Structures are given as C-alpha cells and as structure tokens.
C-alpha cells in the first residue's frame, strides 16, 4: 500500500489546509494514526508557505493521539523569514478542534554541500568557507558492499512502504553485559519500496523540485519508526511478543536534514543510539548515511516507555533498584 497520496492537502485559504484523507495507523489493529504520518503531512503543509526553498530541520511535539476517522486541519504561519531561511509554524487540529501536534519547520535556499563547495571553488572568499566534518559510521558499515545488503534479513515496515535490512547477528543479544546501555550503537539499513518511487513520479508529473520535496516527506514518515525493536535489543534482549506489554508512545521529535544527497531508491545506513532512559522516557538519536558514508539526516526522539517487571529483571546495561 502507498501512503504518499494521503498526504495531499486541500487549500481552504492561504493559511489553512485540510488533508484529503485521514492518516493511517501503522497496523490495522492500532486505534490511532502512526506518528510518522503526522510528521510527513505537517512537513508538506509547511512547504506550502515556502515553495521556493528546501527543508533542513523540523521539530514536532505530539499533543494527543491522532484520530483515524477524519482528516486533520493544518493552520500554517510563517514566523520568521530572511534571505536564506524561513521558519514555518504548523498546528495540526482534529475535527473537534483539539491540537494533536505542533511543528516548526525551517527551510533554506540550498541544502547541498557539494554544490556549495563547487561554487566556492569557482569564486573563493574568506568569509563563508564550505568546510565540513561529520560523524563516522560504525565499522560494520565498511564490511559490506551494496550488493551484500539484499542478502541480509529484510523486514517490511509500515504497510510495506519501506523495509529494514539487518546484518548477520543483529537480532542476537551480543553487547558486552558490562557496557552501559546508553553507550550502545545499532547499525542497520533502510530502503523505500519501488512502488513508492513510482507514486512519487505520478504525483509530481516529473517536476524535479516537487519530487525532491516528496522525498523529504517520505523521510519524515519513517522518522517515527526506529524505537520499539531497538529498545529491547539495546537491553541485550531478543525481541519477543511478550515485550509488547511495554508501552512506547512518541512525545517529541526532531529531524535535521543535513544534505539532500540521498536516494530513496537505494539502501541507506542508519546508526541508532538509545542514549538515555530515565523517568519513564527514552531519548533516541539516529543518523542516516548514504552509501558513500555521508550523513544526510539525524532524528532525535523522546518517547514515553513503560517497562514491565518481567523485562526489567532480564535486561542489562541499567538498573531499577536503589
């Protein structure tokens, strides 16, 4: 099933848009919409006020569960604007008038480091040098070739919109039991399915600018998808159905798009770190790299997590006792 078409909006006026369809849950049996859908449609609504620019960051606070029965209304307002940046505030409102999420999206005129370096090489100046540095992927990233990834264990996610490939041994508890859970890093690959790229082409009618925006929207959709299974693996536990007694609910989420050098038709590498679990909340940082090892996106997420005693007694890397 494709989700992109359900992000389309009807314009009420210059500052108000309504979804053409209700947002979907991650599985049919779930009573509320998937949080990544709210990220994606809020981003698309914000873009309506900055169509000459590209998103480079967003911050969303979830306010209440997202209903499935009616489309959401988006109240959109430009809150700052300069030559290089525009910030847009988006309130997502349900049919009863309740705010389900508040998002601030920041747009910029250009989000491509290579193009900046190329321009500078042709016209150097001393005030705006396109210097760069970044996080390095885990060593496992360099152990495999792109053609190896299709041989990994692959799991279809969110109504088959995208898939996750995990390297050999990923699902086996293998962290040093003496290591702190907050120091553990997880490496895996993600990719959108081919029909999604076909849908992008259909919706954009080969408009290259709009096509790129839809790809940002796609990344917004998957940004809420990295927490549940990793929470248990981070505690050196192999995932099982009994762990579903642990409730995980997204509270707050930020996405930074470092660069537009990404191709959703290819696998990309994710490096995830569940840094803190305290006061019933887990803080997760995930950086996505293209196959050249260049980071193009970082997701930070805080979620409410209720851990039952059965899980807590077998977990390691932390403690619940005085």
Image (tube, helix red, strand yellow):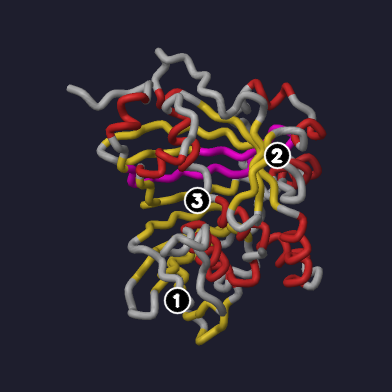
Mark nearest the camera among 1 and 3 is 1
Residue at left 40%, top 13%? Answer: 178
Q: Position of 256 compared to 54: left or right?
A: left
- Mark 3: secondary structure: loop
Foreground pick, 160 / 127:
160
Q: Which mark is residue 224?
A: 3
Q: Quadrant of the N terminus?
A: bottom right
Q: Position of residue 172 (x, y in %)?
A: 55, 24
Mark nearest the camera among 3 and 2 is 3
Residue at left 36%, top 24%? Answer: 314
CA–CA distance between discs 1 and 2?
37 Å
Displayed quadrant of residue 321: top left
Can residue 173 be seen at all in this image of the molecule? Answer: yes
Q: Which residues are magenta?
A: 286-305
Q: Position of residue 12 (x, y in %)?
A: 51, 86
CA–CA distance between discs 3 and 2?
19 Å
Q: Residues within 10 Å of mark 1 (few under 14, many from 20)?
A: some
CA–CA distance between discs 1 and 3?
21 Å
Where 149 sits versus 97, above or below? Answer: above
- For mark 2, what is the residue? 290
Contact, CB < 8 Å: mark 3 with mark 2? no
Question: Which of pointers 1 and 2 lies earlier in the amino acid sequence?
Answer: 1
């Amino acid at each position: 099933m494709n989700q992109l078409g359900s992000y389309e909006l009807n314009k009420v006026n210059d500052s108000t848009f309504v979804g053409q369809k209700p947002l979907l849950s991650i599985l049919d049996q779930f009573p509320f919409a998937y949080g990544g859908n709210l990220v994606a449609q809020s981003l698309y609504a914000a873009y309506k006020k900055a169509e000459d620019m590209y998103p480079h960051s967003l911050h969303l606070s979830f306010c209440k569960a997202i209903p499935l029965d009616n489309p959401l209304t988006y109240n959109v307002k430009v809150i700052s604007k300069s030559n290089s940046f525009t910030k847009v505030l988006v309130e997502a409102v349900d049919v009863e008038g309740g705010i389900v999420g508040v998002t601030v999206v920041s747009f910029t005129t250009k989000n491509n480091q290579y193009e900046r370096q190329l321009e500078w090489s042709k016209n150097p100046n001393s005030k705006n040098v396109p210097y760069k540095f970044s996080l390095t992927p885990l060593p496992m990233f360099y152990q495999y070739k792109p053609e190896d990834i299709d041989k990994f264990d692959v799991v279809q996610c969110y109504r088959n919109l995208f898939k996750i490939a995990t390297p050999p041994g990923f699902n086996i508890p293998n962290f040093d039991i003496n290591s702190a859970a907050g120091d553990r890093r997880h490496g895996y690959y993600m990719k959108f399915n081919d029909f999604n790229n076909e849908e992008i082409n259909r919706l954009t009618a080969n408009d290259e600018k709009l096509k790129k925006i839809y790809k940002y929207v796609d990344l917004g959709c998957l940004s809420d998808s990295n927490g549940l299974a990793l929470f248990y693996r981070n505690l050196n536990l192999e995932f099982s159905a009994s762990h579903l007694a642990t409730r995980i609910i997204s509270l707050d989420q930020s996405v930074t798009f470092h660069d537009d050098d990404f191709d959703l038709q290819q696998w990309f590498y994710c490096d995830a770190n569940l840094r803190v679990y305290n006061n019933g909340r887990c803080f997760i940082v995930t950086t996505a790299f293209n196959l050249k090892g260049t980071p193009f996106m970082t997701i930070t997420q805080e979620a409410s997590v209720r851990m039952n005693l059965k899980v807590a007694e077998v977990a390691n890397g932390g403690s619940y006792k005085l």
